[in-house]
Image (cartoon, helix red, strand yellow):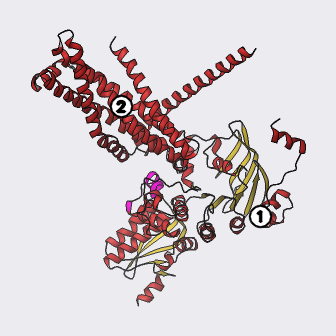
């Protein structure tokens, strides 16, 4: 009797969790669709998405993240070179290290490290900003002024992320390859020119596209998770704190999981 | 339908989650009237306001503004109607990323194609009306509580709305500043003929500005009448409100004991 | 809405009428500014105005400012009651030269 009660509670909880997830993903989807709608139809309804705000967001997302992104990517490049050389030495194939670095950087690490960094910096800032606007009734105020919050707040941010994350991923690719080249020079005595020649030879357009495609999806994930956690804040200042943390953790988790799925399907 | 009635609420029932907040509320506000909605915390007055603003969909009942039922309205229609509504929120709800001036002119920039000069002059005019002339370049964080409320009022009236909603104008303000806001509300009605709904728990302010007072209690309308009618009311709860007596409910000893012991 | 402009004793008189609101204040503004750009002293007749919103008032303010800059004379005449209460709200009745009629103004210029 007690056992069936416990299992019923478990099933109930599972059901509620599942319903919560469905609801949350539905919300992401609606937010995404509505933002797209305003980006496309806004100008025709004399309610364009504010491009000025999008540009300001791009600057906030991109420029200030650049130094730390270059540093992190460079370090990843060095790390890949160290590991690659160490592993390949066992087969006497250490000269092939450039192939490993070039492919894993453009397909994986460039977009991934960028997405994680942006989720941490901009995703959290986004959730905090929208969340505090929500508890200060600024969102309500926009709504009663006849200004759609999705058009006014969400669409510019998503646009900015969709532009900046791929650009930053590309910068991260270059920085990581540079990191690799420095270590290959020190550890293998491989010259910079042969290194870059090899890198360019191994990497074809598809690899770069694959990375950029991923980064577009990551941008969307970071934006939607940040926005939705912000818009759905409850419980005052403490709630904003919770939403911010949740946004970062969720965004990074989704990015990693999506990355895995992508890699699986794109490499079949 | 009464032609002079610009706000008509009929049998409004609202829930928050499973809890019922409004139990069939009826409210009528005539053109040019100042109607003050009063009630303690938990009376449902904030919820009623949110429904009047179309920020929530009720469980049942209707809310007609300027003759149109906003509960059955398409988003686009509501959007048009909202140009005739101004709202000053309790905490001001100014966008913190914009200056005071940018906040006030936001509705004009979004809804009109007026010349920049005209928009600037209109913005300064409204700030003058609320005695904030010269403050347009400051950010909301640099203003005091009373100034923020006045700036929010300037933003609410920048489109010269037909309906003005004001949430708790006197909350958190000293008596002098709140009396000034009351005067301002009266002035706005006198010169622009606005219909004004004020939500407050301040009795003094309500008596000063109201044509009619609507008293809410636990989601029911206790009384809706003129200031004189409210003053003379013999209803115990209203008397308690007037005399600021704390709420005393009959004690059922058994029930009370059970509540205390949790048994 | 197209507003009528008449000439009276060296003044261009702009006759505003009806509801001067967001939909027609740009036209009112243009008419007033055009008169001033033609270097004419300008009076704005508000006697037929049933309602003027702040965009209309803003146009009057801009007109007065423009007139001052150009050294032209400017004034409001026959301000209707609804227009007056809006001007009073912003204390603009203390700012504009206000006259009961065009004749009164012409008499003052004497």
Quarter the N terminus of chain A occupies = top right
Q: Which mark is residue B226?
A: 1
Q: From the viewer's side, name the closer residue of B8 and A147.
A: A147
Instruction: Tell me the chain of label 2.
Output: A
Q: Chain of mark 1?
A: B
Residue B4 sits in which quadrant? bottom right
Q: Secondary structure at mark 2?
A: helix
Dot 1 alpha-carbon crowd within 10 angstroms: few under 14, some 14 to 19, many 20 or more: some
Magenta span dominant secondary structure: helix
Q: Is residue B108 magenta?
A: yes
For this rendering, which residue is in front, B123 or C24? B123
Residue at the spot 88% in from the left edge and 48% down from the top edge = B251
Residue at 71%, 49% in the rendered image: B44
Q: Tell me the magenta residue range.
A: B105-116
Give the residue drawn at x 27%, y 20%.
Answer: A104
Q: Is residue C40 at least partly visible in the picture? A: no
- Res A50 seen here: yes
Quadrant assignment, res C59 = bottom left
Question: Residue A45 at what x, y percent from top left?
Answer: 44, 43
Element under disc 1: strand
Q: Is residue B170 shown in magenta?
A: no
The answer to which image quadrant residue B61 occupies is top right
**Whole-percent x and y of residue B46?**
66, 50
Q: Is residue B107 above or below residue A256?
A: below
- Identify the residue position indicated by label 2 in the image: A115
* Residues flagged by tags 1 and 2 on a common chain: no
């Amino acid at each position: 009797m007690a056992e069936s009660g416990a299992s019923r509670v478990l099933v109930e909880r599972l059901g509620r969790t599942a319903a919560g997830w469905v609801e949350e993903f539905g919300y992401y989807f609606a937010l995404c669709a509505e933002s797209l709608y305003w980006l496309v139809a806004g100008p025709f309804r004399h309610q364009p998405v504010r491009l000025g705000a999008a540009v300001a967001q791009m600057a906030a997302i991109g420029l200030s993240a650049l130094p730390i992104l270059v540093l992190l990517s460079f370090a990843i490049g060095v790390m890949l070179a160290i590991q690659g050389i160490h592993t390949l030495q066992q087969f006497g194939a250490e000269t092939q290290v450039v192939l490993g670095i070039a492919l894993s950087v453009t397909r994986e690490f460039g977009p991934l490290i960028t997405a994680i960094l942006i989720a941490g910096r901009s995703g959290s800032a986004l959730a905090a900003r929208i969340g505090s606007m929500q508890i200060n009734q600024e969102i309500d105020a926009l709504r009663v002024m006849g200004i759609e919050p999705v058009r006014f707040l969400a669409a510019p941010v998503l646009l900015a992320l969709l532009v900046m994350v791929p650009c930053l991923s590309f910068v991260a690719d270059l920085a990581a390859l540079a990191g690799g080249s420095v270590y290959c020079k020190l550890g293998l005595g491989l010259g910079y020119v042969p290194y870059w020649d090899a890198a360019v030879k191994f990497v074809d357009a598809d690899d770069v596209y694959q990375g950029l495609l991923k980064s577009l999806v990551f941008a969307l994930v970071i934006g939607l998770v940040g926005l939705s956690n912000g818009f759905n804040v409850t419980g005052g200042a403490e709630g904003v704190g919770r939403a911010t943390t949740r946004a970062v953790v969720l965004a990074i988790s989704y990015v990693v999981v999506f990355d895995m799925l992508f890699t699986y399907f794109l490499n079949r | 339908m009464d032609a002079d009635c610009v706000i008509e609420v009929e049998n409004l029932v609202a829930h928050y989650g499973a809890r019922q907040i409004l139990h069939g509320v009826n409210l009528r506000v005539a053109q040019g009237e100042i109607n003050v909605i009063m009630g303690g915390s938990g009376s449902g007055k904030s919820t009623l306001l949110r429904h009047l603003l179309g920020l929530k969909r009720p469980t049942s009942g209707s809310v007609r503004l300027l003759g149109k039922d906003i509960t059955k309205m398409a988003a686009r229609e509501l959007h048009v109607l909202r140009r005739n509504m101004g709202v000053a929120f309790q905490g001001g709800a100014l966008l913190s990323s914009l200056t005071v001036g940018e906040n006030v002119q936001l509705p004009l920039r979004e809804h009109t194609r007026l010349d920049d000069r005209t928009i600037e002059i209109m913005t300064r005019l409204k700030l003058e009306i609320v005695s904030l002339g010269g403050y347009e370049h400051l950010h909301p964080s640099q203003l005091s509580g009373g100034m923020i409320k006045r700036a929010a009022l300037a933003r609410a009236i920048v489109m010269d709305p037909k309906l003005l909603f004001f949430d708790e104008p006197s909350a958190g303000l000293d008596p002098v500043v709140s009396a000034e806001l009351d005067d301002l509300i009266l002035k706005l009605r006198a010169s622009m003929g606005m219909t004004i709904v004020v939500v407050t728990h301040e009795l003094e302010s309500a008596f000063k500005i109201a044509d009619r007072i609507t008293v809410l209690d636990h989601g029911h309308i206790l009384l809706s009448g003129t200031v004189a009618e409210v003053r003379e009311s013999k209803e115990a709860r209203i008397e308690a409100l007037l005399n600021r007596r704390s709420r005393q409910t009959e004690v059922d000893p058994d029930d009370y004991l059970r509540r205390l012991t949790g048994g | 809405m197209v507003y009528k402009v008449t000439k009276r004793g060296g003044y261009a008189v702009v006759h505003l009428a009806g509801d001067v609101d967001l939909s027609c204040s740009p036209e009112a503004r243009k008419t007033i500014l055009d008169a001033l750009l033609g270097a004419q002293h300008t009076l704005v007749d508000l006697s037929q105005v049933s309602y003027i919103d702040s965009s209309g008032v803003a146009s009057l303010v801009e007109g007065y400012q423009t007139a001052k800059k150009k050294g032209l004379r400017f004034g409001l005449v026959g301000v209707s009651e609804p227009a007056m209460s809006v001007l009073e709200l912003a204390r603009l009745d203390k700012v504009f030269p206000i006259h009961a009629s065009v004749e009164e103004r012409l008499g003052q210029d004497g």
